[in-house]
Image (cartoon, coloured by chain):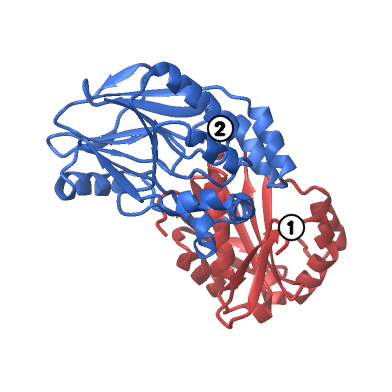
């Protein structure tokens, strides 16, 4: 096993490697985001299919502010979860979580595995609570975060907008990192 | 009897040396090590060797257990996991045997010592409901007054008074005299990776004669510990956090 990675097993028995993103992941990431379902991309904040955006991301990797976790199966990226942290200010004890799972690996427990890993990392980094903002219609994501210990705290009606201009509701989910019992 | 409480050494030899030097001068009767000798930092063998030179009673923490059984390490986050995988390849066979023989709890005159809680090396006492649950076990189940615990890497003093109120007490400098009729949960903090904002190596001294606890800490060569971590190829974050005490 290569240093600084961890192996997990999905519901279908396939083995997945979890590890932090590194600069060498540029092409793998582009390939991954091209494979992500168009519908799922609608819920993302950035244009992750734009190579320039990926380059910018890769060039400025700083695990102290954004810890990007990669899931790999047979050398291919199949999932990406990021933990966003602030070191100062009134939200310094909070982290934000974002998660994308490739269509062909949804429903196999990969999302739950990655969110659980992010919760463990958040505890390691001294964060107290994690926040996830999810579209009300992203049912799979809502279920994944709930299973990992998040609970819905607020719903903001018509707060977000898809590329076609259609408004949607945003759910804010929170996980109390230190109170979570294994 | 004066009992020194040390916990969560986590292979930090620089911190352990300074704490033991202070304890030598303080003249304690016994040193209780509340677990997690290994993991995170880069000098597990040196720490295990040094502990053999003192009258130390140790118990097993979740990282000690994970070093012996890789399946347990699967529950660790990727950073802690990497550090324990590294330690598995480093710890000498005689010290693995030592870790294998460690108990999960130890009992003494009116107290029980554990890593996480008396029933699990992997559970935390961070919040009121967690403290309340352990205090109930202490009072009703174990019929003991005091529980020493670690695992959180943060100093803490929980109490349950005679009316059943559960809360934490502020950690004042100097001796804190405890109420003889109350029950207490005492966490001395971490020797090798403190997480309460003070990077100094933390420990405590419990005195069962005047029923008191004193929280103490000592500075150590953080830079040397950081260099060892980086030279071992462990995650950089593990080195950086030592300087911040997080």
The disc label shown at residue B30, or none: none
Q: Is residue B73 above or below residue B168?
A: below
x, y (%) of residue A118?
A: 58, 57
On the picture, is B6 further left or further right than A156? Answer: left
Chain coloured blue here: B
Color of chain A here? red
On the picture, is B37 further left or further right than B239? Answer: left
> Nearest the camera: A54 or A177?
A177
Q: For the point 50% across and 21% down, which residue is it?
A: B21
Residue A5 appearing in the image: yes
Q: Is residue A180 above or below residue A100?
A: above
Q: Secondary structure at mark 1?
A: loop
Task: Give the residue number, with chain letter if any, for mark 1.
Answer: A21
Quadrant that contains the C terminus of chain B = top right
- What's the chain of the residue with tag 2? B
Give the residue furthest to the bottom.
Answer: A12
Mark 2 to mark 1 CA distance (whole Å) = 26 Å
Residue A94, quarter of the rendered image = top right
Task: Give the residue number, with chain letter if any, for mark 2.
Answer: B245
Q: Nearer the viewer, mark 2 or mark 1?
A: 2
Quadrant that contains the N terminus of chain B = top left
x, y (%) of residue A115?
A: 56, 62
On the picture, is A182 further left or further right than A30? Answer: left
> Nearest the camera: A142 or A32?
A32
x, y (%) of residue B72?
A: 49, 62
> Nearest the camera: B47 or B187?
B47
């Amino acid at each position: 096993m290569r240093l600084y990675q961890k192996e997990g097993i999905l519901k279908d028995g396939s083995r997945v490697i979890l590890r932090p993103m590194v600069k060498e992941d540029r092409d793998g990431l582009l390939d991954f985001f091209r494979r992500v379902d168009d519908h799922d991309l609608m819920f993302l904040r950035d244009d992750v299919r734009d190579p320039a955006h990926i380059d910018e991301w890769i060039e400025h990797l700083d695990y102290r502010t954004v810890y990007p976790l990669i899931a790999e199966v047979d050398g291919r990226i199949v999932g990406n979860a990021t933990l966003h942290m602030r070191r100062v200010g009134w939200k310094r004890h909070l982290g934000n979580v974002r998660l994308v799972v490739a269509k062909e690996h949804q429903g196999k427990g990969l999302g739950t595995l990655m969110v659980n890993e992010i919760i463990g990392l958040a505890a390691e980094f001294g964060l107290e609570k994690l926040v996830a903002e999810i579209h009300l219609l992203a049912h799979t994501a809502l279920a994944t975060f709930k299973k990992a210990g998040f609970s819905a705290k607020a719903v903001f009606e018509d707060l977000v907008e898809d590329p076609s201009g259609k408004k949607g509701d945003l759910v804010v989910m929170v996980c109390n990192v230190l109170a979570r019992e294994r | 009897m004066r009992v020194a409480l040390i916990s969560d050494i986590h292979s930090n030899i620089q911190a352990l040396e300074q704490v033991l030097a202070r304890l030598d001068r303080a003249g304690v009767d016994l040193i209780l090590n509340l677990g997690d000798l290994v993991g995170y930092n880069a000098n597990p063998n040196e720490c295990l060797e040094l502990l053999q030179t003192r009258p130390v009673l140790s118990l097993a923490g979740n990282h000690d257990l994970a070093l012996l059984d890789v399946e347990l390490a699967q529950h660790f986050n990727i950073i802690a996991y990497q550090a324990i995988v590294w330690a598995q390849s480093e710890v000498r066979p005689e010290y693995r045997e030592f870790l294998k023989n460690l108990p999960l709890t130890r009992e003494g005159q009116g107290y029980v010592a554990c890593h996480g809680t008396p029933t699990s090396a992997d559970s935390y006492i961070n919040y009121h409901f967690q403290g309340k649950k352990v205090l109930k076990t202490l009072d009703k189940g174990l019929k003991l007054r005091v529980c020493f615990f670690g695992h959180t890497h943060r100093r803490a003093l929980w109490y349950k008074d005679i009316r059943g109120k559960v809360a934490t007490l502020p950690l004042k400098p100097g001796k804190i005299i405890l109420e003889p009729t109350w029950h207490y949960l005492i966490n001395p903090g971490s020797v090798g990776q403190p997480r309460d904002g003070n990077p100094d190596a933390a420990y405590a001294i419990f005195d069962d004669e005047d029923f008191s606890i004193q929280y103490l800490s000592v500075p150590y060569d953080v830079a040397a510990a950081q260099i060892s971590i980086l030279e071992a190829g462990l995650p950089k974050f593990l080195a950086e956090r030592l300087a911040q005490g997080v």
